[in-house]
Image (tube, grey):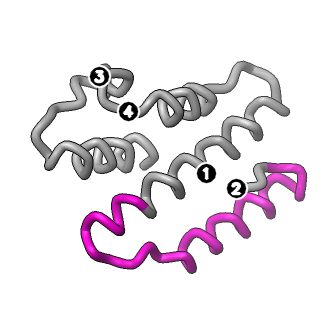
Amino acid sequence: MLEIMLGWYIGSRTDYSVFCGKQNKYFKRYLPETIYRLYQQTFPDSSYAHFWKSMDASCRLFRETAVLVAESLGVVYPEEYEQGFITYVKAVSGGSGADC
């Protein structure tokens, strides 16, 4: 879902006139550098601790871009859905998971 949202984010910035490429290979070209760096942090290695750090990066990146996409479309970002997901993540992580 994060990559779909990033595609929508790119679309909202380009009037939906560009193609992100097969498997989003053009993300680096179309995403601002700060967002692309955060996107790179969503890929963990095999470390359990790094998994939760990447989950946190994914949550932050999704929220950051989704709020901007919602604004560009003139709709309200559904905070209640996000809060439900955060509650779920904390439950499955035993409290040691992502801060989202």
Identified by mark 4, the residue type is: Leu
Q: Residues within 10 Å of mark 3 (few under 14, many from 20)?
A: few
Q: Which numbered disc flags the more N-terminal residue, 3 or 2?
A: 3
Q: Which numbered disc flags the more N-terminal residue, 3 or 1?
A: 3
Residue 23 versus residue 91 in the image, above or below:
above
- Disc 2 designates what residue? 100
Residue 83 versus residue 25 in the image, above or below:
below
Which residue is drawn at the image coordinates 14% and 46% (left, top)? 16
Instruction: Provide the secondary structure element on which disc 1 rests.
Output: helix
Q: Residues within 10 Å of mark 4 (few under 14, many from 20)?
A: some
Instruction: Provide the secondary structure element on which disc 4 rests.
Output: loop
- Disc 3 designates what residue? 26
- Disc 1 designates what residue? 59
Identified by mark 1, the residue type is: Cys
Residue 93 versus residue 29 in the image, above or below:
below
Instruction: Provide the secondary structure element on which disc 3 rests.
Output: loop
In which quadrant of the rendered image does the C terminus lie? Answer: bottom right
Which residue is drawn at the image coordinates 45% and 46% (left, top)? 2
Which residue is drawn at the image coordinates 63% and 29% (left, top)? 41
Q: Which numbered disc flags the more N-terminal residue, 3 or 4?
A: 3
